[in-house]
């Protein structure tokens, strides 16, 4: 049994069958890539995992518990963090504050009326946030307004925010889109390092095959809402159906 | 100092000094001079500065931090007022009793109204709070007149039960609100040359609560809780997907700001033990919104400035009449004098709303950050060298909610 078990999940938007009977099993401490052409339903699938969408049919189990019927914050507190396709950060807050919030959420839970102590007096949290900023190579931007950063920087911040929660399952939706090559490589290295050091399972959606093949242990190819094949990266590379449906198209 | 960083501590000390010395600061003109009408240092008005300052500081905790714009906060002002007067009637004339019951009662109302209204955000939230406040007004005005005494307003009477005190004084007069015997209306006047300064007991009671309330607001702004509230304003989605439940955060902010409003109501009736339904009217709710935006929403000092500004206008500008204008422009030739007075006439006296409205529009258009932004720009002019500018920007992002 994998840490994430998706069974027969279907989702329909009006007349469009965005997902049809998706089955997916992600093993613990592996990196599982989901690839597929635009509009294949990759983001929709992730939305069904984190409570943003409720699937019409099927079940989603995480670590033996169903995520369906839970609110997004409960699902996150179970140990699933997500990086979005368009960066979701706290634009009005400073970069450092952005980084502190998920650490507070991990320490204090979904709500804490911590109204009298000073934010910057919380040394343990400040330290962890600073540390994560260093890892993301963003320490020099700590006092910047988060909204004023480039798209690539926002995304790196978001990845850092998700990592600092130390999730058991990290969902990445095109994490390197809009990043400079150097930052992409840096992000790959960081993810690899984290995968080796910690108990973390990663599910990644990515169009950049360089990223996919450097990280993934297994790959699922999604097309028109249904998984086409699932295999190891080497097998996927040579698979005729995949070449035709996806790699061929984008090449 | 006091658990505040240097900048905040300085701001706090300035506010304390201003509040304590207000009887001097607000009475700069000698009593007999023609400018004496601009003096604002009389007890009644000074109390109002502080009470509305408290109201606005509390409102800003909700609106300034979370961005939830309540159009019904006057309901809590009214609830606090009624609760306070009932305390005077039933229990005793000590203002502490009244104030405590005002704050608790408004907290109860805020929990209920907040719990329901916060199911929606944006304009729908505003409309829900407005609807609640108007319902409260209607209840107070007619339906519940047994409790609120309807149109007349709730006041002390000769047959109040008053467990901890007499219903009527020995000489037949009604007892007055006091703090362990110190009457709120007690005033000492200090005469220095042509100047006169009033020191009023009620004012200093308000001052203590205002300073405590302001201090608490600073602590909340700088706390993890305050940061979460700003995060709510910035991106609720991200909050949810970071494992944070925004509901209790917004509800806590709503209740806290409702309690500030209740405190303001309690202080109002402590100064003058009379509560009327019009205190809940939507114009009152709108007033606190104006105060907060005019001063600078989301800033610490803004709401205090906004409250002072509007109350000053309401009380001082409204007293300027044509005769006063004629006095000012007497140096002009008659025809011109009359013309100038004729032009200015709509903006003074009862027309003060017009002047305030224009000023409000100018501030919103040219200084979206309110009076605080105006102040910062003026300061900036004085000490701007290119290098400094960059430094200031990073400072600003360090304390975005100043
Ligand atoms: N909330 C929604 N309402 C209606 N249709 C939607 C919604 N979300 C997604 N869709 C549609 O479902 C289909 C799958 O969308 P999805 O975003 O999952 O694709 P994707 O595989 O992530 O594509 P991309 O690579 O471009 O991100 C698309 O046709 C999209 O237009
Ligand atoms: Mg997508």
Image: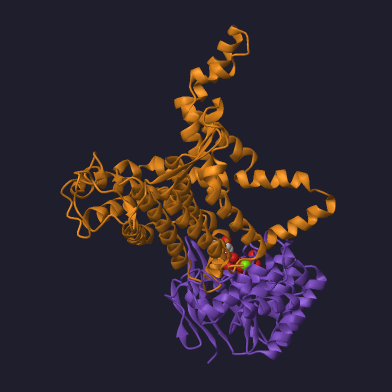
Chain colours: A purple, B orange
Q: x, y percentage for residue B112?
A: 33, 60
Q: Residue at x 47, y 27 (%)?
A: B319
Within the displayed image, which quadrant is ligand 1 positioned in? bottom right
**Vertically, is A30 above or below B296?**
below
**Vertically, is B320 above or below A93?**
above
- The quarter of the picture where residue B8 lies is bottom right
Q: How many marks?
A: 0
The quarter of the image holding the C terminus of chain B is bottom right
Q: Residue at x 58, y 19 (%)?
A: B328
**Vertically, is A225 above or below B111?**
below
In the image, A48 versus A243, the foreground residue is A48
Q: Residue at x 59, y 58 (%)?
A: B12
Instruction: Using the rendered image of the protein, determine whether residue B17 is visible from the camera's viewpoint.
Output: yes
Instruction: Using the rendered image of the protein, determine whether residue A221 is visible from the camera's viewpoint.
Output: no
Q: Residue at x 52, y 31 (%)?
A: B31
Q: x, y percentage for residue B354?
A: 50, 29
In the image, B393 versus B379, the foreground residue is B379
Q: Is residue A7 left or right of residue B28?
A: left
In the image, A75 versus B87, the foreground residue is B87
Q: x, y percentage for residue B209?
A: 45, 57
The quarter of the image holding the N terminus of chain B is bottom right
Q: x, y percentage for residue B139?
A: 25, 47
Tell which residue pokes out farthest to the bottom in this image.
A1
In the image, B321 versus B224, the foreground residue is B321
Q: Is residue B161 left or right of residue A148?
A: left
């Amino acid at each position: 049994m994998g840490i994430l078990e998706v069974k027969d999940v279907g989702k329909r938007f009006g007349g469009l069958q965005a997902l049809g009977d998706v089955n997916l099993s992600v093993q613990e401490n592996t990196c599982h890539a989901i690839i597929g052409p635009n509009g294949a339903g990759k983001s929709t699938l992730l939305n069904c995992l984190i409570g943003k969408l409720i699937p019409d049919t099927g079940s989603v189990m995480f670590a033996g518990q169903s995520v369906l019927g839970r609110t997004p914050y409960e699902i996150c507190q179970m140990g699933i963090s997500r990086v979005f396709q368009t960066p979701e950060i706290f634009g009005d807050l400073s970069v450092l504050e952005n980084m502190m919030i998920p650490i507070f959420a991990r320490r204090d839970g979904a709500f804490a009326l911590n109204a009298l102590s000073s934010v910057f007096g919380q040394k343990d949290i400040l330290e962890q946030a600073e540390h994560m900023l260093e890892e993301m190579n963003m320490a020099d931007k700590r006092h910047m307004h988060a909204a004023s950063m480039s798209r690539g920087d926002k995304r790196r911040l978001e990845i850092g925010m998700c990592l600092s929660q130390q999730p058991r399952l990290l969902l990445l939706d095109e994490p390197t889109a809009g990043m400079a090559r150097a930052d992409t490589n840096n992000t790959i290295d960081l993810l690899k390092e984290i995968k080796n050091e910690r108990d973390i399972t990663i599910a990644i959606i990515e169009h950049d095959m360089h990223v996919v093949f450097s990280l993934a242990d297994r790959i699922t190819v999604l097309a028109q809402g249904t998984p086409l094949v699932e295999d190891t990266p080497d097998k996927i590379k040579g698979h005729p159906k995949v070449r035709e449906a996806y790699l061929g198209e984008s090449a | 100092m006091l658990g505040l960083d240097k900048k905040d501590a300085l701001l706090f000390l300035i506010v304390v000094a201003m509040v304590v010395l207000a009887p001097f600061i607000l009475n700069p003109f000698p009593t007999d001079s023609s400018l004496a009408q601009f003096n604002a240092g009389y007890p009644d008005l000074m109390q109002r500065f502080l009470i509305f300052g408290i109201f606005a500081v509390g409102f800003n905790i909700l609106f300034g931090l979370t961005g939830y714009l309540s159009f019904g906060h006057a309901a809590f002002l009214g609830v606090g007022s009624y609760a306070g007067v009932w305390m005077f009637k039933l229990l005793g004339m000590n203002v502490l009793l009244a104030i405590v019951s005002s704050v608790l009662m408004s907290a109860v109302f805020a929990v209920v109204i907040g719990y329901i209204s916060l199911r929606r955000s944006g304009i729908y939230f505003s409309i829900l709070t407005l609807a609640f406040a108007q319902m409260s007004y209607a209840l107070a005005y007619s339906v519940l007149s047994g409790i609120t005494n309807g149109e007349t307003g709730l006041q002390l009477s000769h047959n109040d039960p008053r467990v901890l005190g007499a219903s009527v004084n020995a000489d037949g007069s009604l007892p007055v609100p006091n703090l362990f015997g110190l009457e709120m209306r007690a005033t000492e006047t200090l005469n220095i040359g042509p100047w006169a300064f009033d020191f009023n007991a009620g004012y200093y009671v308000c001052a203590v609560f205002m300073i405590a309330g302001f201090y608490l607001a600073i602590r909340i702004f700088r706390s993890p809780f305050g940061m979460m509230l700003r995060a709510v304003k910035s991106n609720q989605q991200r909050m949810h997907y970071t494992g944070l439940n925004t509901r209790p955060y917004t509800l806590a902010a709503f209740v806290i700001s409702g309690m500030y409003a209740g405190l303001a109501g309690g202080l109002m009736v402590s100064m003058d033990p009379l509560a009327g339904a019009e205190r809940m009217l939507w114009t009152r709710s709108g007033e606190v919104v104006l105060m907060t935006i005019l001063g600078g929403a989301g800033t610490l000092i803004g709401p205090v400035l906004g409250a002072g500004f509007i109350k000053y206008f309401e009380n001082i500008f409204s007293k300027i009449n044509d005769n006063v204008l004629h006095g000012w422009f007497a140096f002009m030739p008659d025809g011109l004098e009359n013309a100038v007075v004729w032009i200015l006439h709509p903006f003074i006296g009862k027309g003060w709303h017009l002047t305030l409205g224009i000023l409000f529009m100018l501030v919103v258009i040219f200084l979206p950050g309110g009076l605080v932004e105006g102040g910062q720009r003026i300061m900036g002019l004085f000490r701007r060298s290119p290098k400094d500018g960059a430094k200031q920007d990073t400072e600003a992002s360090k304390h975005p909610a100043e």
